[in-house]
Image (cartoon, coloured by chain):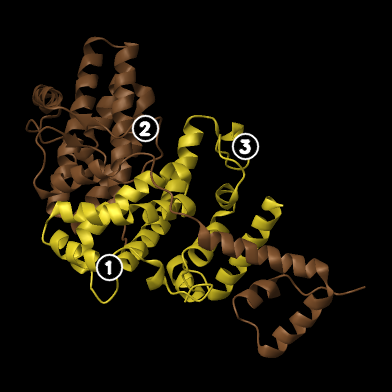
């Protein structure tokens, strides 16, 4: 019975990795072996098809999204605050990041202002300082204060909030290498999400158990987690 | 040198002179020049992302590659062509994202409780089991080596460096990929 060469030798043959005596030996075998000749031909066909693969273009024009990011980095678009940093996420059906319009941002800002006052009174800190997403010198305890508030409003969400707070801490510890404009953008976006969290917590205090408000709070926490996960990717080195 | 005797440089056929002018303009902050670079190169970058990562991530990765390129244009040195530089940047970014994206995919699927209901292999409705689909079905490591070597023309030494593996492993993965493709395409 004919002994066939190890199939790896065929790839080595195609790539020119075999020494001349090995090439001669393989060619002698191929001359009398249809099985191995067919294998080599198949591998050559695969190589050929790979080289001939045409470019495959995106299903939509990606330039507007890129242009938007470039524009924001060059000075910002006051009409849109981009929460998606261009870092790929597992896409849910056609949802492309979160955007807040000016009225929504203003509403969120008002909510922050109102709720910060409530939180400040409750915790005995100066209003507005407890929920800042990440700034040098802000302790984990202060950053995490919103976690306990979430826990009081909806105990089942406290664990999720804690995970998000850990991500927040992680980012705070490693954002030093980021461009200041990027940090500013991240802080701005996190402030808006924090505003939505505060607003939901505040509403739940007056209407405990409201399913809509609970869902709203959960969505805001998950959005913050997703945003922080994307942002933490920015601090991982890429060459 | 790529399989078949061509070099990576010769594969990058898109207007190197125009690229040079547009890179200079884009590096000075001209977004229209950068758009022209995008138009000339996005097909190849998207193809790379689509073949090396997952179909559903390809567009996001393509966008991210060009955003990254915009921010790093200042580091581009004209000894290499812009295309070579860009594709290398794309490969690095795609490889750096793979673990994160895979983790996120698993987490996402787990959170939605549908992980156990998925088929063992990827399936893309409407996509015939052609060569592209067969590539998508390869195990990740074998797929990435196959795309880098047989499609993109990177040598094993460079693939090994990019992927943090030995050249021997790269060769072995390439052969594995070719044999699996052969089985699938029978």
Q: Would you place residue A159 above or below residue A72 in this image?
A: above
Quadrant in which residue B141 is drawn: bottom right
> Going 70% across and 66% down the picture, which residue do you hit?
A41
Q: Dot 1: few (<14), some (14–19), or many (≥20) neighbours within 10 Å?
A: few
Q: Is residue A177 above or below residue A187?
A: below
Q: What label sits on residue A17 in the rendered view? A: none
Of the residues tagged 3 and 1, which is closer to the observer? 1
> Vertically, is A25 above or below B4?
below
Residue under circle 3? B119
Residue A150 position, x and y percent, is 28, 26
Q: Quadrant of residue B173?
A: bottom right
Q: Is A63 or A75 nearer to us in this picture?
A: A63
Q: For the view shown, which residue lies furthest in the left direction?
A: A126
Q: At 29% from the left edge and 15% from the top edge, which residue is drawn?
A: A213
Residue B29 lies, in percent from the top left, at 11, 57
Q: Would you name the residue on which mark 2 appears?
A: A160
Q: Is residue B99 left or right of residue B78?
A: right
**Measured Cα–Cα span from mark 2 to mark 3:** 29 Å
Colour of chain B in the rendered structure image: yellow
Q: Which mark is residue B16?
A: 1
Task: Tell which tag, 2 or 1, sits nearer the viewer.
Answer: 1
What's the CA distance linking mark 2 and mark 1? 51 Å
Q: Are marks 2 and 3 in contact (CB under 8 Å)?
A: no
Q: Secondary structure at mark 3?
A: loop
Position in image of residue A18 (x %, y %)? 65, 83
Q: Are marks 3 and 1 on the same chain?
A: yes
Looking at this view, name the residue that lies furthest to the right.
Answer: A1
B48 or B145, which lies in front? B48
Q: Which chain is brown?
A: A
In which chain is the residue bearing label 1? B
């Amino acid at each position: 019975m004919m002994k066939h060469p190890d199939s790896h030798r065929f790839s080595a043959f195609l790539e020119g990795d075999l020494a001349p005596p090995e090439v001669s030996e393989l060619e002698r075998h191929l001359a009398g072996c249809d099985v191995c000749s067919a294998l080599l031909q198949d591998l050559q066909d695969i190589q050929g098809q790979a080289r001939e693969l045409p470019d495959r273009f995106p299903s939509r024009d990606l330039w507007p999204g890129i242009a938007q990011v470039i524009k924001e980095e060059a000075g910002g678009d006051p009409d849109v605050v981009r929460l998606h940093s261009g870092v790929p996420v597992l896409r849910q059906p056609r949802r492309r990041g979160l955007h807040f319009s000016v009225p929504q941002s203003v509403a969120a800002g008002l909510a922050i202002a109102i709720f910060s006052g409530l939180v400040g009174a409750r915790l005995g800190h100066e209003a507005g300082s407890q929920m800042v997403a990440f700034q040098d010198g802000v302790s984990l305890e202060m950053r995490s204060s919103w976690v306990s508030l979430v826990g009081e409003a909806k105990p089942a969400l406290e664990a999720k909030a804690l995970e998000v707070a850990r991500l927040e801490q992680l980012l705070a510890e490693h954002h030093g290498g980021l461009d200041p404009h990027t940090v500013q953008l991240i802080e701005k976006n996190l402030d808006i999400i924090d505003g939505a969290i505060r607003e939901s917590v505040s509403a739940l205090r007056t209407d405990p158990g409201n399913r809509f408000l609970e869902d709203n709070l959960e969505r805001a926490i998950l959005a913050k987690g997703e945003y922080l996960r994307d942002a933490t990717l920015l601090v991982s080195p890429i060459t | 040198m790529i399989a078949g005797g061509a070099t990576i440089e010769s594969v990058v056929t898109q207007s190197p002179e125009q690229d040079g002018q547009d890179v200079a303009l884009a590096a000075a902050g001209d977004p229209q020049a950068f758009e022209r670079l995008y138009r000339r190169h996005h097909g190849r970058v998207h193809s790379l992302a689509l073949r090396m990562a997952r179909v559903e991530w390809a567009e996001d990765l393509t966008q991210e590659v060009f955003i990254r390129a915009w921010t790093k244009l200042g580091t581009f040195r004209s000894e290499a062509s812009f295309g070579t530089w860009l594709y290398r940047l794309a490969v690095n970014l795609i490889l750096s994202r793979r673990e994160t994206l895979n983790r996120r995919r698993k987490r996402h699927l787990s959170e939605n409780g549908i992980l156990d209901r998925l088929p063992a292999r990827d399936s893309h409705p409407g996509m015939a089991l052609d060569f592209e689909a067969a590539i998508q079905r390869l195990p990740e490591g074998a797929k990435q080596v196959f795309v880098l070597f047989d499609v993109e023309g990177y040598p094993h030494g460079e693939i090994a460096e990019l992927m943090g593996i030995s050249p021997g492993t790269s060769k072995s993965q390439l052969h594995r990929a070719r044999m699996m493709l052969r089985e699938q395409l029978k």
